[in-house]
Each structure stands twice: as C-alpha cells, then as structure tokens.
Amino acid sequence: MQIRAVILTLLLGFAGFVLEHLPMPDLLSWLQPLWLLLLISILVLHAPHQFGLWLAIPLGLMLDVENHQLLGLNVLTLGVHIVLLQLLYRRLIMFHFLQLTAVMMLLVVVHQVLQFWAVALVSENRVPVAIWEPALVSGLVWPWLYALLHVGMKRLHLA
C-alpha cells in the first residue's frame, strides 16, 4: 500500500468522525447523513484490493466508543457493509451514477436495520432507529461527496 493511500485513509477517517459529530440545530438534527459510512464506501469502491475489512475493526470500535453503543456493533455493521460492497464491486462500477446513489441508499438502510436488530437481540430496550432519514440524506450527499473525492483521488494518482 502506498503512503499516499495510508495518509488519505487517515484523513478521510478523521474527517468522517468530525462530520459525524458536527453540531446541528435541533430542528435539523434528523438531517445528519452517515458520513463515515459514505467515506468508507468511496474508499472501497475506488480500491477494493487496498481498502477492505481491515477498515471495519478500528473505525467501528472508535465509532462504538464515541456513540456509547455496544462494543462491536459498528464493527459488525461496517464489516457487512464492506463485504457487500466488495461482493458487488464488479457490478457497481458499471452502474450509472443515479443507480449507484440508489444502491448506496439501500446499503444505508441495510446498515440501519442491522443496527436495530443487533440492539434488539442483545438488550431489552428496543429503541427505534431512524431508517429512512439517514438513507435519504446520505443519498443526497453521496453524489457531491463521490465527485469531490473522485477528483481528489485522481489528482493523487490513487484511482
């Protein structure tokens, strides 16, 4: 792995964690996309041989600690997300941009449902999880984020 890829991974991970906890007014708090999930998706789609399941363990554990969730919950959901992206990689790169946006929205829904099921299985507190709002907002943010990082990776000769 190139040093530029490692630096890019660290910078995108840091940016993802900062954006995850960006303070928003109460009125707009439901408009928070899943930034880290989107950034990981872009990394895996651009270089699936370099960015794989090894991303899920440290980033998932740090996200668990930051969000005060069950330890390993985000490792599981990020791992499933990365595996699905790697399994569908050859088909996803042939999709049109809008089709890729719809697939990303569907993958965010799968992530949210997995989180809800895991918490429901382990604890008696069945706290409802927002499923559709993060998917819709992530779908709106995805094209801009994908285009911006695609240009940045081309300039760094990583894609």
Image: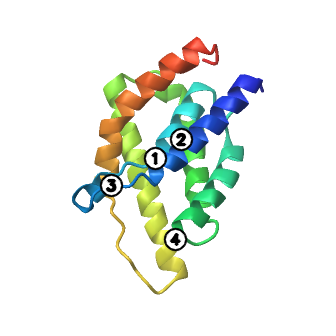
* Residue 27 vertical position relative to residue 129 in the rendered view, above or below: above
Residue to which mark 1 is pinned: 19
**Image point (57%, 12%), residue name:** 155
Tell me which label, 3 or 2, sits earlier in the chain. Answer: 2
* Residue 100 vertical position relative to residue 30 in the rendered view, above or below: above
Tell me which label, 1 or 3, sits earlier in the chain. Answer: 1
Residue to which mark 4 is pinned: 118
**Image point (36%, 24%), residue name:** 97
Location of residue 100 in the rendering, given as x and y in whole percent from the top left corner: 39, 31
Secondary-structure class at tag 3: loop
Q: Amino acid at mark 4?
A: Ala
Question: Quarter-wise, where is residue 146 in the image?
Answer: top left
**Image point (36%, 22%), residue name:** 96
Secondary-structure class at tag 4: helix
**Looking at this view, is 84 or 25 the one in front?**
25
Q: Quick check: marks 1 and 2 in contact, CB under 8 Å?
A: yes
Residue to which mark 2 is pinned: 15
Q: Amino acid at mark 3?
A: Met
Q: Amino acid at mark 1?
A: Leu
**How far is disc 3 from disc 2 in space, using C-alphas?**
16 Å
Q: Residues within 10 Å of mark 3 (few under 14, many from 20)?
A: few
Q: Residues within 10 Å of mark 2 (few under 14, many from 20)?
A: some
The residue mark sitting in front, 4 or 1, is 1
